[in-house]
Amino acid sequence: MLKKDILRRKDDFTSIYKKGKSIGERYIVLFYKKNGLSYNRIAFLASKKVGNSVERNRARRLMRENYRVLKDNIRQGYDLIFIARNSINGKKAYDVKKSMAGSISKAKLYKG
């Protein structure tokens, strides 16, 4: 991921939470909103409810890796925030990928 692809500013997060839409799945929650750019900007979050730092980092790693696999099939021009739920602990990458793919398809963000 390039630096331009990562959401960092508080204003961006606030805007997505207030004006965007959300989709809940078993292991993640997806917030999304059009950004008017030709590329997607993303963020992966895991709160302290997910667990200690090891578990939070693993959750973010799982989401990042599965996004890398799925990103070629996702429409461009959106801000995406993937938030890990505490049910993600101890799950395999395949389970998280299924959850992410489900949320992306519910949001109708797949190409074609």
Image (cartoon, rainbow, N blue to C red):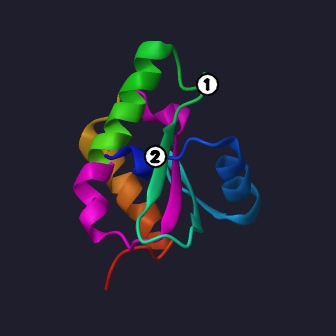
Mark 1: amino acid: Lys
Q: Which residue is mark 1?
A: 49
Side (left or right) of 89 relative to 61 = right
Dot 2 alpha-carbon crowd within 10 angstroms: few under 14, some 14 to 19, many 20 or more: some
Tell which of 46 and 10 is nearer to you: 10
| 76 vs 51: above or below | below
Q: Which residue is mark 2?
A: 6
Q: Quadrant of residue 20?
A: bottom right
Q: Which segment is the magenta one?
A: 67-89
Local secondary structure at mark 1: loop
Local secondary structure at mark 2: loop
Tell which of 39 and 89 is nearer to you: 39
Q: Residue at x 41, y 23 (%)?
A: 57
Cα separation between marks 2 and 1: 23 Å
Q: Residue at x 49, y 45 (%)?
A: 43
Dot 1 alpha-carbon crowd within 10 angstroms: few under 14, some 14 to 19, many 20 or more: few
Q: Residue at x 69, y 42 (%)?
A: 10
Mark number displayed over residue 61: none
Residue 9: percent from left, percent from top: 63, 43
